[in-house]
Each structure stands twice: as C-alpha cells, then as structure tokens.
Amino acid sequence: VSVCVLACLLRLSSLCSLRRIQGHMMSSQAGADVLMEKVGNAGVITLNRPKVLNALNLPMIRHIYPQLKKWEKDDETDLVIIKGAGGKAFCAGGDIRAVTEAGKVGDPLAQDFFREEYILNHAIGTCKKPYIALIDGITMGGGVGLSVHGRFRVATEKTLFAMPETAIGLFPDVGGGYFLPRLEGKLGLFLALTGFRLKGRDVQRAGVASHFVEAQKIPALEKELVHLKSPSAEDVSRLLDSYQSQVRKQGYLQGNHTVLWPFLPFRLFSSSSVEGILQNLKADGSPFAKKQAETLSKMSPISLKITYKQLQAGASLSLQDVLVMEYRLSQACMRGCDFYEGVRALLIDKDQSPKWNPSSLEEISDQSVEECFSSLGQKDLRF
C-alpha cells in the first residue's frame, strides 16, 4: 500500500516540475533530434540523439509521422530508410523518464506519447512503400516499434535486441503483442517475459530481423538502396539477399552471436499461466531454467501477468487491434504503481531493488488483470 500512497503523492507533487518537463519536451529541437532527407529515390530518416542512444521522444514522433505519410504518397519517393546516428544504437527505446514524470502529475504527455507512438507504429506496419530499418546497434522498446513492423529489418553483428519492459512495470508494447506471438514456438513469450537480449545473427534467426549484413557494409548497402529506380519489394529483397549472401561467405554464421539455436528449451514456456511456466523452470533444474526462473522472480508480477495475456490475445488479432489493446494497457500502467517504482529502481535511483505491489503472482486476481484490458470508451486509441 505504501508504494501506491507514494505514487499518489508523487502525482500531486508541484506543478513546477510539470512545467519543466513540458518545456524540456516541447522545446526539444525535434528537427535536430530526427533528420529527414530525400537522398536519390529514398526518404531517409536518421534518429539523431546519439548521446541518449537515439531515445524516441514525442517531438520526434510528431516529425516522423507526417513525413512518412507524405513520402508514402509521393510519386518521386520509392522507398523509406530509417537508421540511427552515432554508431552505438538504432534506438534504445522511448523517453520513459519524461513519460514517468508526466504520469506522476497527471500531465497529458502520458497519454499523448503512447497514442501517437502507436499510431506511428501502425503507419510503419501499413506503409505501401518498401520500409527498410537498419537496426545496427542497440534496438529496444520504442526502437523495436520503429523497425519490426516494416517490411525489411537489417541486423548486423552489432545489433542488440530486447523488450525489457517487465523489469520496469510495463509490458512489451509498440505492437509486441502482434509480432512476439508470431515468432517460432514459445520464443516470443520467452523474450517478452524475461527481457532476454538477442545479439547479432540471432536477431535474424529469431525472425525479428529479415536480413543480416556485416556492419561495415551498411553504408554501401544504403548507397545502392537509395539509387534503386522504382523498386518493387522484390527488388529490395534481392539486393538485401545479395548482401546477406556475402556475409555467409565470410563465416559470420559462427561469429558474434549468442548460442540460441537449437539448444534453449523454449518448451518450458508452454503453460496456461505464468505460475505454470515458473513450475516448469523449477522442475527442469537446468542452468538455463534456473537463470530464467531467477530473472522472472525480479520482474513486476502484474507486468508478467499482463504480458502473458497480451501475447495470448495478440496472437489472433490484427496489428491495429493489438495497438488498441496495448494503449489500454499503457494507461492501466500509468494508473498503477509498478511502472513508477520500476523506473525509479532501474533508471533513476539505480538501486535495482524495486518494491513491486502486489509483490507476488499469487496476490494478483484474474479480475485485476482483466481490468487492465478494459475499454477506455471515448479515450480509446483510434486510427
């Protein structure tokens, strides 16, 4: 209860801090934070906040969305490329700290950010032009939403993919409920619940990336892409395939990746509940199973329950319907306690000791999980 009381007190905290947040967010030089260029026959989006690993903020979303729609209709733009500046990250996620501060004081940013981000995710997923995300470097959370729904996702040996939201009292959003259950077997559920990090070639093996190209070849690939004349999706695919085939000749199949296939027993994540998964892991007793059980024990219990149901439902929904569902979940997290506590423990105080409320899976009723999925009426996400 004390955590909830704290969250409520934080929401009532001084409006001075709110004004400071708004000033920071909306005066942000979105034009500098995200660069839009027409290069050859391509529209090129460059996420340009390298000091914060190209974290996505609301002004950036508001820059990207209209430009993407404009290029989609433009007869002289044949494809869209999105990439990150700085060499370390494509995009390490959304600007969660700003959203947290806004949520504490009831600022609309906590609604607007998720709403507009999800609308952009849908626009990427339905883009009529070939959309190519060069996910070279860290790609997490909001960065996954900017890439995974596009037709082409190009990973390199420097790619690091994860959806680590259950560790901060959230859930794998930005359409995670759509793409994760469509990965092979129970791999998506495993990634969603544990926040496990995929590296290099494994990002493509898992089906998150469509192609794998050596990082040093990315500039040459981009140069060829922008000069393709009226390319079909098949033309783009052939070019990417040709770069991927060069990698195979250089032996990248053996290098720079975690040993994921075929060794990890994802079958342990086959269960009708999160509790059942934990029982499977404990009964198995292997080093892998022990490590995953330990990881799950640190995650927000309500986040684990929400995430399990999210993926279960999302497996049979369209991307649009998944995003409507996820918007409802995002607002349930804004009303709750664990998101604020998770961000405090992992990102602000960095004590790595969140006090979750409820503190165990057993304390969470099916009804309390169901309520997170309830319609918001007039405030529901609309396209």
Image: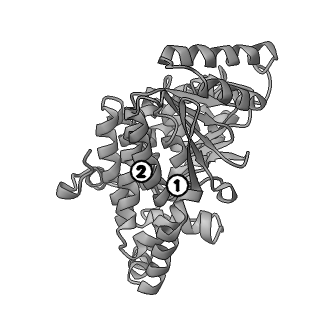
What residue do we see at 38% from left, 47% from top? 118
* Residue 86, visible in the rendered structure: yes
Mark number displayed over residue 265: none
Q: Secondary structure at mark 2?
A: helix
| Position in image of residue 98 (x %, y %) | 50, 67
Q: Amino acid at mark 1?
A: Gly
**Considering the image in quadrants, where does the N terminus appear?**
bottom left
Identify the residue shown where x is 67% and y is 46%. 89
Who's the residue at 46% across and 48% down the image?
A: 64
Q: x, y (%) of residue 183?
A: 49, 26
Circles 1 and 2: CB distance less than 8 Å?
yes
**Tally of marks:** 2
- Which residue is under mark 1? 94
CA separation, marks 1 and 2?
9 Å
Write down the residue under mark 2.
Answer: 117
Q: Is residue 366 above or below residue 83?
A: below
